[in-house]
Amino acid sequence: MPVRDEAAQIAGDIAELRHAIHREPEIGLELPKTQQKVLAALDGLPLEISTGRGLSSVTAVLRGGRAGDSGGPVVLLRGDMDALPVTEETHVPYASVIPGAMHACGHDLHTAMLAGAARLLSARRADLPGTVVFMFQPGEEGYAGARQMISEGVLEAAGERPVAAFALHVSSNWLPGGVFSTRGGPMLAAADQITVTVHGRGGHASTPHEAADPIPVACEMVTALQTMVTRKFDVFDPVVITVGSFHAGTTDNVIPDRAEFLATARSFSRKSRGALAELVPRLIGDIARAHGLTAEADYARQYPVTANDAGEAAFAGQTVAEVFGAGRGEVARFPLTGAEDFSFVLEQVPGAFVMLGACPPGRDPETAPSNHSAAAVFDDAALADGTALYAELALRRLVRA
Ligand SMILES: [Zn+2]
Ligand SMILES: [Zn+2]
């Protein structure tokens, strides 16, 4: 029976696992309940299972009956498992029972689909010409869980390094339900954090000349950052800077001692990222100095660009077309400005990050609430196809290797 049909047959079990994970979302690197659900779903399968030391990850290795002596070739499949600090407002029957935590990025689907793929591939173990590593990862949302799993050895879990790595990500809007999207080259942005503190000298608001007011100086920095984006960066190698947090002062008649703001910086190339890290602190420091104040600007590199390998992205697209039909796949015209820590895997292993539309029927993908929204809903219909694609990518890539 084709993998796709088998995935459809176990879709009920995959949905059940997804709903159980969705009901009890966990945030960050420690996801003990989610880890237990994954381990229970994998129980009885012919897998070598290990769990993380510094995070509640699960690494499962499936050694095929026709693998080489070294266990190779190896393909890695990744699913992330963590939720977001969002209070769910969807009213789905399996909604989160934990206030302040929600699977608003659909990672519950990824976890359930990857467990489903482990089941389908385990049933084909005897014929597998290589090894599959299933990477169940906590802490995608800002905790760099993938980097930690790499440092704990996930890329060496099978003995030999993977020849290719794939990750799926669902979207509650933008893509029509059931449509897969990927591209060669940059798929998602690098995301870095800028932390600025402007040091002034407080005083009475009626006599600003006797104080050193940090507020107008910090405001000037915010607008200067936007000007810098348009004057210092190639329009075809774009950069986004958004100041998302700005705090200073307590009331109208007091000049505060300092002002603070936080910004995110998104970029798509090593060159632009390097320029940001150099230019932003210089701009902040020089503006402060122009007004006789001082400022600190910390440029913290967080997630690198998620860069798909051109060949692996084309292979993933071709697999989608062969398994589901040409109409179900698209080549993304542009990268997305979101970021992903699967980028750390793709820095070391060629592979592809593939998006899957999970917008529920009856909602318009153009206007449906997006990932991270308290109202985001991801359709269960994506589960069987996502499971089938994970399994087919591993099967076909091992045969080709
Ligand atoms: Zn997310
Ligand atoms: Zn996500």
Image (cartoon, rainbow, N blue to C red):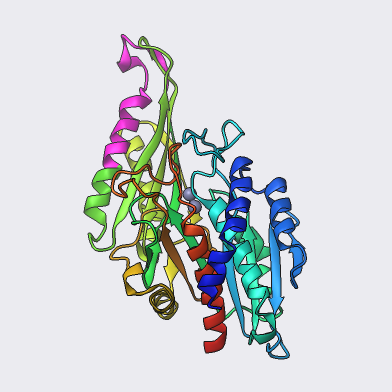
Q: Residue at x 50, y 50 (%)?
A: 106
Near-viewer residue (272 or 28): 28
Residue 347 appearing in the image: no
**Residue 332 in magenta stretch:** no
- The residue range painted magenta reads 199-224
- For the C terminus, the image quarter is bottom right
Where residue 162 sits in the image (x, y, percent)?
Answer: 60, 78
Q: On the picture, is 120 further left or further right than 334? A: right
Where residue 60 sits in the image (x, y, percent)?
Answer: 70, 68
Would you place residue 399 above or below residue 142 in this image?
below
Q: Residue at x 42, y 27 (%)?
A: 247
Q: Residue at x 63, y 62 (%)?
A: 115
- Image quarter for residue 312? bottom left
Would you place residue 229 above or below residue 24 in this image?
below
Q: Residue at x 62, y 85 (%)?
A: 73
- For the N terminus, the image quarter is bottom right
